[in-house]
Image (tube, rainbow, N blue to C red):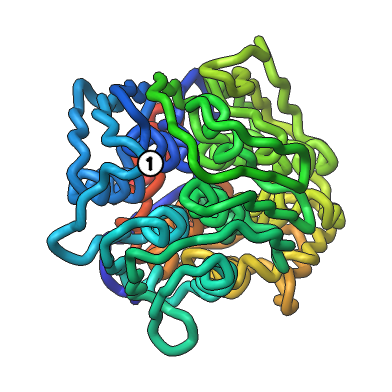
């Protein structure tokens, strides 16, 4: 797992200044390709994330007979084939590193007339799939997995699905979305209840593509038997990619960055609330709508941070931001306590363990707990850390290097291209000192 890929070196930088737009939102890009492929008619996706994860999803639909043109960088024209128009892929579909791709595709493929197989890279092959297999099986799907509910997944087609009323045991937008997508193919109503509201892009995009969907925070319902109507999708900049710059500028003295057109759907911006509690100076300028999603330009200036107990209610709204939150905590004064975040152990890596080990190497006093960590802020030193191929851990360590007394060498960074192609160039353009 680790050892492959590329090594980066991040060193102390001067102030970070300038304006930038990070690439398109990963969650929205995945869904846009899926919905556009299943719609009747032609949809244009602008601001599509040219990352490996989302490209793998586009390739999956191309392999099932959907014509997807790359009209320009970050734009796709998708010739939808309709809900029942996919054809059997001639080989297994490789979802790469993408949990979202695999889990949402499982929901769609459960409703097809043909058999299919989903595979993934080493990291994805270790991620739990029972959470989608079990409820989909209750709907009538037939899905085989490896021992322990791991990929590859073999999905048997030709099953008749029936809607269920399902309470998710853990808050997960991926599981919710897989069930709603299967619900499009099911007889009757599918209801998903969440222990805490999660990102609602599937629900919002269903509505944009003309499918009746009832949803409010924590509950969503669809009924089968309709049509998706092609529509154009404009993808905002990904808050989770902006997050690295929000923390970087907060911790490097003299910094002043403007991050343009960032999606600020409240189900994604828990880190903003956490950073503000820590004393960060971040202002959402020109809040507006872009393609039906709330966006703003985020201005972030350096400010001394102090440790906090991260409110557990924020955890689902910042679930992808813990690697960088750990770095903010290491740079803060005092203690930061993270609890209620056991899900971090089943992300692209065990993010609690990977960040704790790396930050400890850099001299940070950090103690792991089963569902979080206790992090003492203080000075960071240099050292060699391993991202174990987790894109967000790699970028988190790159930010840590900006304030370290010594070089931070980061192993296995190639997977940053899954979510943030061009990170090194964009980061160096605003003042990072990051070498490959
Ligand atoms: C995502 C949901 C989250 C998140 C992931 C993207 C989505 O996963 O961590 O990066 O697009 O629905 P979970 O549903 O497993 O929490």
Q: Residue at x 70, y 43 (%)?
A: 271
Toward the bottom, the furthest residue is 147
Badge 1 density bin: few <14, some 14–19, many ≥20, Cα 10 Å? many
Q: Residue at x 51, y 53 (%)?
A: 186
Q: Is residue 56 above or below residue 113?
A: above
Examine the image and state in which quarter residue 293 appears.
top right
Q: Is residue 243 visible?
A: yes
Q: Secondary structure at mark 1?
A: helix
Q: Residue at x 75, y 58 (%)?
A: 377
Toward the left, the furthest residue is 90
Classify residue 335 as left or right of residue 104: right
Along the line of sight, the residue nearer the viewer: 383 or 426:
426
Q: Is residue 430 above or below residue 220?
A: above
User: How far across and how far down the image is residue 167, in percent?
Assistant: 74, 62
| Residue picked out by circle 1 | 34
User: How far across and how far down the image is residue 292, in percent?
Assistant: 57, 19
User: How far across and how far down the image is residue 40, in percent?
Assistant: 33, 28
Classify residue 386 as left or right of residue 403: left
User: How far across and how far down the image is residue 114, in percent?
Assistant: 26, 62
Along the line of sight, the residue nearer the viewer: 4 or 119:
119
Classify residue 323 as left or right of residue 339: left
Q: Is residue 422 visible?
A: no
Q: Quadrant of the N terminus?
A: bottom left
| Number of numbered labels in the structure image | 1
């Amino acid at each position: 797992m680790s050892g492959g890929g590329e090594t980066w070196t991040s060193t102390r930088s001067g102030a970070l200044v300038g304006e930038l737009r990070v690439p398109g939102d990963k969650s929205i890009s995945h869904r846009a390709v899926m919905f556009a492929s299943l719609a009747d008619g032609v949809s244009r996706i602008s601001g599509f994330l040219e990352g490996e994860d989302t490209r793998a999803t586009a390739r999956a639909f191309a392999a099932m007979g959907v014509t997807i043109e790359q009209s320009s960088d970050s734009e796709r024209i998708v010739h939808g084939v309709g809900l029942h128009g996919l054809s059997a892929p001639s080989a297994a579909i490789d979802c790469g590193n993408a949990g979202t791709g695999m889990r949402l595709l499982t929901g769609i493929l459960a409703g097809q007339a043909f058999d299919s197989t989903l595979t993934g890279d080493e990291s994805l092959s270790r991620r739990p799939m029972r959470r989608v297999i079990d409820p989909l099986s209750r709907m009538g799907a037939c899905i085989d997995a490896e021992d322990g509910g791991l990929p590859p997944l073999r999905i048997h087609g030709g099953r008749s699905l029936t809607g269920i009323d399902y309470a998710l045991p853990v808050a997960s937008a991926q599981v919710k979305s897989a069930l709603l997508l299967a619900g499009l193919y099911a007889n009757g109503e599918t209801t998903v209840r969440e222990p805490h509201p999660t990102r609602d892009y599937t629900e919002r995009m269903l509505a944009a593509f003309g499918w009746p969907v009832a949803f409010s925070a924590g509950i969503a319902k669809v009924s089968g038997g309709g049509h998706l109507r092609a529509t154009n999708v404009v993808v905002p900049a990904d808050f989770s990619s902006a997050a690295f710059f929000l923390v970087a500028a907060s911790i490097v003295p003299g910094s002043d960055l403007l991050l343009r057109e960032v999606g600020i759907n409240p189900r994604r911006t828990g880190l903003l609330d956490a950073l503000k509690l820590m004393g960060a100076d971040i202002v959402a300028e020109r809040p507006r709508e872009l393609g039906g999603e709330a966006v703003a330009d985020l201005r972030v200036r350096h400010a001394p941070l102090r440790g906090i107990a991260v409110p557990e209610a924020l955890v689902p709204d910042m679930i992808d931001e813990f690697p960088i939150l750990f770095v903010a905590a290491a740079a803060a004064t005092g203690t930061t306590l993270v609890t209620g975040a056991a899900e971090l152990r089943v992300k692209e890596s065990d993010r609690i363990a990977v960040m704790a080990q790396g930050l400890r190497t850099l001299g940070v006093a950090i103690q792991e707990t089963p569902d979080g960590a206790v992090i003492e802020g203080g000075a960071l030193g240099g050292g060699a850390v391993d991202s174990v191929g987790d894109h967000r851990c790699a970028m988190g360590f790159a930010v840590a290097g900006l304030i370290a007394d010594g070089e931070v060498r980061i192993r296995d960074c190639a997977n940053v291209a899954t979510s943030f192609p061009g990170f090194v160039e964009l980061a160096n353009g605003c003042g990072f000192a990051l070498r490959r």
